[in-house]
Image (tube, rainbow, N blue to C red):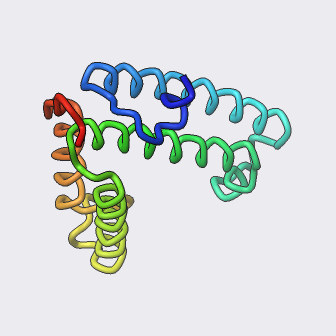
Amino acid sequence: MLDLVFGLNTRLGRLQFFLATLVLAVVMTAICFVVAMSVLRNVNSANIRPDDLLKNGGIIAAMAFFAIATIELYSMRFRDIGWDPACVVPAWIALMIVDYVVAMKFPAYALGQEHTGTVVGSIANLVLTLALLFWPGRERYT
């Protein structure tokens, strides 16, 4: 059970990955709802700004939890496919950082005025997500 929670050497099949992603989405929705309600109860909602929300410890903890859980799920699925998560995950993160920098420095390449990504980054995310959902896993991990 702890292998599945920490995902150190666990493999995750396509259906398990899909169901775990759905469960994570439901859990994160519930966490965001609880944190938002606690913030709105403690702050005057007429004067609230997005910067004020990011100063809340609950939101920071929720963001960290979501990032760690997502990276663990992706790493388990990459391992099942046979790709090395130590190479694929940092490369994916680096691609998203470069995509963000390009979108900020060259707004004409961004998807919209308020968007922080480009078409290339969106296509890369789509392809990688489809690979995680539909690429068959290996029978044995070597």
The residue located at (75%, 49%) in the rendering is: 56
Task: Give the residue displayed 26% in from the left and 36% down from the top.
Answer: 80
Question: Which percent across, then down, holds residue 70?
Answer: 45, 41
- Between 92 and 77, the one lying in front of the other is 77
Observer able to see residue 17: yes
Q: Is residue 113 visible?
A: no
Name of the residue lying farthest toward the right:
42
Q: Say above or below: 90 vs 21.
A: below
Q: Is residue 60 above or below residue 66?
A: below
Could you say where residue 42 lies in the image, as x and y percent from the top left? 85, 39
Quadrant where the image shows the N terminus: top right
> Going 28% across and 53% down the picture, which residue do you hit?
84
Q: What is the quadrant of residue 134 in the picture? A: top left
Image spot of residue 75 (x, y percent) = 37, 44
User: Is residue 135 toward the left or the right of residue 88 in the image?
Assistant: left
Where 72 falls versus 113 (above or below)? above
Q: In the image, is residue 59 above or below residue 34?
A: below
Residue with the most extreme bottom position: 105
The image quadrant where one finds the C terminus is top left
Looking at the picture, tell me which residue is in the foreground, 39 or 64: 64
Position of residue 140 measured from the top left corner of the image (x, y, whole percent): 20, 32
Which image quadrant for residue 119?
bottom left
Asked if residue 19 lies left or right of residue 40, the reply is left
